[in-house]
Amino acid sequence: MLDVSVGFLIILGITSNIFFKDKIYSLTQDLEKCKLKINDYEVESAIFSAIVEIMDIFGKDVSMEEILSHVNQSISNFFKKEVVIVQLFGEHFFQDIKGGSINLPEETFEEIATQAYPILINNLNSFPRYKFLETTGVSSFILVPLKNKKEETVGVIGVFSKNQRVFTQKDLSLLKLISVPISLIIENAELIEKTKVLSITDPLTHLYNRRHFQFYIEKITKQAREEKFHVSLAMCDIDNFKIYNDRNGHPAGDKLLRDIAEILHQNIKGSDIVARYGGEEFVIIFPNTHKDTAFYISDAIRNKIKDVEFPGEEFQPGGDLTISFGIACFPCDADTYEDLIRKADIALYEAKRQGRNRTIVFNGLK
């Protein structure tokens, strides 16, 4: 009887052990599934947060650089250990890199980045085209193009791992999800930028308009007062423009204004500002420039315009189309921007009074 009881207990122990092992295995499997689900929820939550952060700047008047840096930070919050690159191509070229660096020549990066479709590569050895990335320490990467409304690739989001990360299709899908609002924001930012440019640009000559000139001259003279540097101002006026316009017609007059604007723009320093002041009158702001230098530059432009053979100029007085300049300097001639404009205008009037086609510097003129 004792032997039977002992046998029963042994069998029960073995059965129980198997049962509990199965139960523990089942619970372990359930736990792993729960962890995966929690990880998925965390990933989705992170991506949702990134999209909310990205859309938060939609419509705001911020620069493209600020937008892309903000976007990249949002993506980097998810791909914490990877190198994240957000880049625009073409005339709006800009690149923001977070999480490290990748020593790639610009042309090489563009070659792999300007694809019309997303790329996910985990095994570089299987793709000879991308094997060179191993020399930069990259083990795997994702590239997702940014497209405009015409479905043209205008930029890219790139996530590069140097930590042997195995990217998943879910990583790729979520990155594609992020690319949609980013593309919208980039288009919106470009529209805002174009609108801003139009608001400060003269539509005929494409120079700055009078409104922007007023804003800038006030700003730069204030800065000059604080930092103790000179600002020179040249006002110039096409001589006998009415005669030219009446004799050759308004289309020819408009073309002349555009041609003069181009000459002015092409012959100033990079820090100088040229604007159309009104009618046939233009202004040039020379920051950090004494009036002697402003005179030298302005008189060289005057001579250049005199030497150009403009269509129809033979009907001008003297058979030549010319321009006159008046120059004043802050703070040596004026202590406010309004007075600087007035003094330059007085000098211009004196150039006209003396017979036109000359450059006059304000030196105590009345």
Image: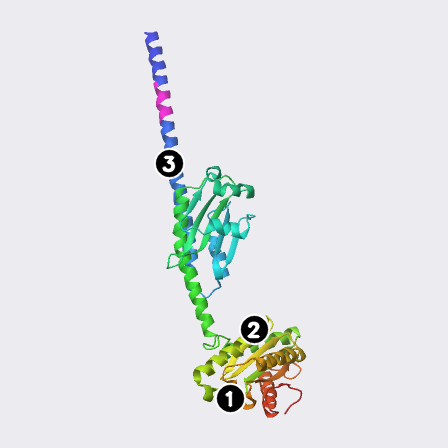
Q: Amino acid at mark 3?
A: Lys
Number of the front mark, 2 or 1: 1
Q: Is residue 58 visible?
A: no
Query: Real-space Cα distance between discs 2 and 1?
Result: 27 Å
Residue 29, position as x, y percentages in the image:
37, 32
Give the mark nearer the N terminus: 3 vs 1. 3
Residue 74, position as x, y percentages in the image:
46, 53
Element marked by disc 3: helix
Identify the residue under disc 1.
315
Q: Amino acid at mark 1?
A: Phe
Q: Which residues are magenta?
A: 15-22
Decide: few, some or many residues near mark 2? Use Cα within 10 Å; few <14, some 14-19, many ≥20: few
Q: Nearer the viewer, residue 254 or 98?
A: 254
Query: Real-space Cα distance between discs 3 and 2?
Result: 68 Å
Q: Which mark is residue 136?
A: none
Tell me: residue 19, above or below residue 305. Answer: above
Q: Nearer the viewer, residue 222 or 149?
A: 149
Position of 294 with respect to 104 (left or right) is: right
Q: Nearer the viewer, residue 98 or 281?
A: 281
Query: CB under 8 Å between callouts 3 and 2?
Result: no
Identify the residue under disc 3.
33
Residue 148, position as x, y percentages in the image:
40, 58
Element marked by disc 1: helix
Identify the residue under disc 2.
266
Element marked by disc 2: helix
Q: Is residue 37 visible?
A: yes
